[in-house]
Image (cartoon, rainbow, N blue to C red):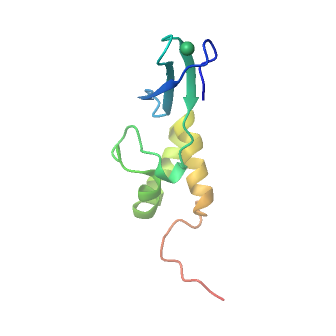
């Protein structure tokens, strides 16, 4: 990516917002103009829980160890983290009726 002001090279600096979203701040290394943020696309299963008793763990890991917690969190958290949790739960096919990991597979 190039600077929209002078066409120079952009520097990328990672910033983590209070809601846990990672953004890349784009700053021109030539004219020092700020070129906005590039939202980082993070796989929801690799998204880290920003708070709570599982803070710092990825949603994928929490889903493996404690799917009940994610189901609870989905109903109790709001905003970005809620969408991430919903994404993980649907990817892993975790529902209220089926949230025990050792369901035998039948063919
Ligand atoms: Zn520039």
Residue nearest the observer in this picture, 24 or 73: 24
* Corner quadrant of residue 65: bottom left
Q: Residue 84: horizontal and vertical position, in percent?
A: 56, 44
Q: Residue 48: horizontal and vertical position, in percent?
A: 42, 45
Q: Is residue 6 above or below residue 92?
A: above
Left or right of 50 on screen, residue 82: right
Left or right of 77 on screen, residue 54: left
Q: Residue 38: horizontal and vertical position, in percent?
A: 57, 29
Q: Is residue 1 above or below residue 70?
A: above
Residue extending farthest to the right is 107
Q: How many marks?
A: 0
Identity of the residue drawn at 62% across and 87% down: 106
Residue nearest the observer in this picture, 92 or 67: 92
Identity of the residue drawn at 44% across and 63% down: 64
Which quadrant of the figure shows ligand 1?
A: top right
Identity of the residue drawn at 49% across and 45% down: 73
The quarter of the rendered structure image containing the N terminus is: top right
The quarter of the rendered structure image containing the C terminus is: bottom right
């Amino acid at each position: 990516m190039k600077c929209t002001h002078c066409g120079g090279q952009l520097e990328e600096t990672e910033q983590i917002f209070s809601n846990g979203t990672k953004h890349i701040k784009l700053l021109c290394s030539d004219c020092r103009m700020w070129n906005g943020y590039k939202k980082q696309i993070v796989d929801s299963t690799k998204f880290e829980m920003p708070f709570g008793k599982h803070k710092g763990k990825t949603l994928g890991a929490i889903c493996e160890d404690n799917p009940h917690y994610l189901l609870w969190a989905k109903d109790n958290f709001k905003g970005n983290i809620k969408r991430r949790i919903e994404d993980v739960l649907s990817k892993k096919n975790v529902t209220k009726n089926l949230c025990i990991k050792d369901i035998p597979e039948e063919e």
